Image (spheres, rainbow, N blue to C red):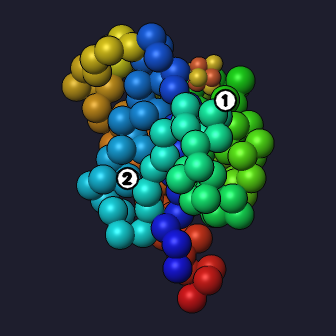
Amino acid sequence: MSKIKVIPCSGVGKVLGLLARESVLKVTQEQLPNDTETLCLAHVVTGDDEVVKKIVGARCITMDGCPKYCAKKSVEAAGGEVEYSYKVPDFIKPHRGEDHGTGTYLTEDGWKFVDELAEIMVKTANEMQEEVI
Ligand code: SF4
């Protein structure tokens, strides 16, 4: 069975984009490396052959940095099946007032928020796996 694709937006220059990217890397590289993988959004958008082969019809989770949903829209346009679309602002309410860092670095609170976002995606990916068993 192919791995679930977990794809963040590119949100360069915004802490919300960095939170999205780091949380996806945590899921795909540290927590569920055997069940999930990520793909470069730029390659998704430009239609890189290898990436297109992987994404068409694939089960995907996206994590965007804002309501523009660049990751969700790009993955769908490339033929991926976005089963769960998240955006960082959906989870920020309990973190209001915290300093998460900038577009290039995260504070301790930022990394804690990354852990929380990663946990949400890990739970989702595990539930998706259970659906097919
Ligand atoms: S979803 Fe928002 S933060 Fe992410 S790349 Fe698009 S505009 Fe930037």
Residue 34 screen position, x and y as percent: 35, 69
Extreme residue in the front direction: 49
Q: Quadrant of ligand 1?
A: top right
Residue drawn 69% across and 37% down? Answer: 74
Q: Is residue 87 visible?
A: no
Q: Is residue 105 above or below residue 89?
A: above
Q: Which residue is mark 1?
A: 70
Mark 2 belongs to which amino acid?
A: Val
Residue 125 screen position, x and y as percent: 51, 64
Residue drawn 72% across and 46% down? Answer: 78
Residue 63 screen position, x and y as percent: 56, 40
Q: How far, Cα to Cα, is label 2 from label 1?
A: 20 Å
Establish whether ligand 1 lies closer than 8 Å to the Cβ of label 1: yes
The quarter of the rendered structure image containing the C terminus is bottom right
Q: Which residue is mark 2?
A: 27
Which corner quadrant of the image does residue 62 belong to? top right
Q: Secondary structure at mark 2?
A: helix
Q: Is residue 35 above or below residue 71?
A: below
Q: Is 121 positioned to the left or the right of 77 in the image? A: left
Residue drawn 55% across and 37% down? Answer: 43
Mark 1 belongs to which amino acid?
A: Cys
Earlier-in-chain disc, 2 versus 1 = 2
